[in-house]
Image: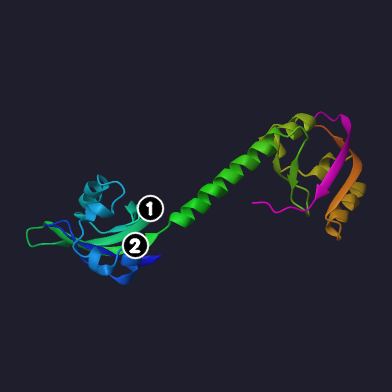
Amino acid sequence: RLGLSPIEDGVTGKVVEANTAAAELFGYSRETLLGLPVKNLLAEPDSEQAFVRILAKSAVVDYELRLRTAQGDVRECLVTATGRIDAAGRLIGCRGLARDVTERNRMLTELRNAERDYRGLFENAHDAILVLEPETEVVLDANRQACILYDFPREQFIGHSMLELSVNPEKAQGLWNSTKSGDRFATFESQHLRRDGKVIDVEINAGDAWWG
């Protein structure tokens, strides 16, 4: 949500102007919001001093502030504001925009948690797992068990084509292509080479997946 944030009177520390969007953001009627001490709108009252110090020197863009609504809910906002400076160079007020990013931040946190959980499952799986580029079979990622199986450090394994490690590349390519011809998943046996040249028999479960 984007709205005109309260304009603070630098002398009294109260809201002297606010639009409808600001009233909706804070959950007050516009009449109630006018004259309200700005500290009442801050989830962390001490954050006002840091904000004012920066604003006295220059405009702020996407400054992170935690604001509190009339219902007591805390909203994470990005504030873009300019100060009003008097002839003596003192900050006497400010005006700006407050963008509510609470929901966006929640989604980003959930995404990071999901990525962390996936990474844990990927790394700690008992089976070797490889993520391959579909056309060239170049390794995009490999879990710990895959590195052990093929005797490759991860940094060397990534970028390697599995076709180079296949005893029968043509057969392997045909089997791999079967996952791209309408059969999303395929299971087949193959023979691969470890880094030391030793041949190993492997059972492969392959399928399309989004990556990145």
Viewer-nearest residue: 111 or 20: 20
Residue sitting at 84 percent across and 51 percent down?
Answer: 185
In the rendered image, residue 77, in percent from the top left (x then y), is placed at 37, 56
In the rendered image, residue 65, in percent from the top left (x then y), is placed at 33, 52
Q: Which quarter of the rendering shows the N terminus?
A: bottom left
Residue sitting at 21 percent across and 52 percent down?
Answer: 52
Viewer-nearest residue: 132 or 60: 60
Q: Where on the picture, by quarter, is residue 163?
A: top right
Task: Using residue 211 as the reference point, say whether residue 18 is left or right of it.
Answer: left
* 199 is within the stretch colored magenta: yes
Q: Where on the picture, by quarter, is residue 23?
A: bottom left
Q: Give, as a three-letter code, the residue at label 2.
A: Gly
Q: Which mark is residue 73?
A: 1
Q: Residue furthest left?
A: 88
Q: Which residue is mark 2?
A: 27
Task: Using residue 104 as the reference point, say whether residue 187 is left or right of it.
Answer: right
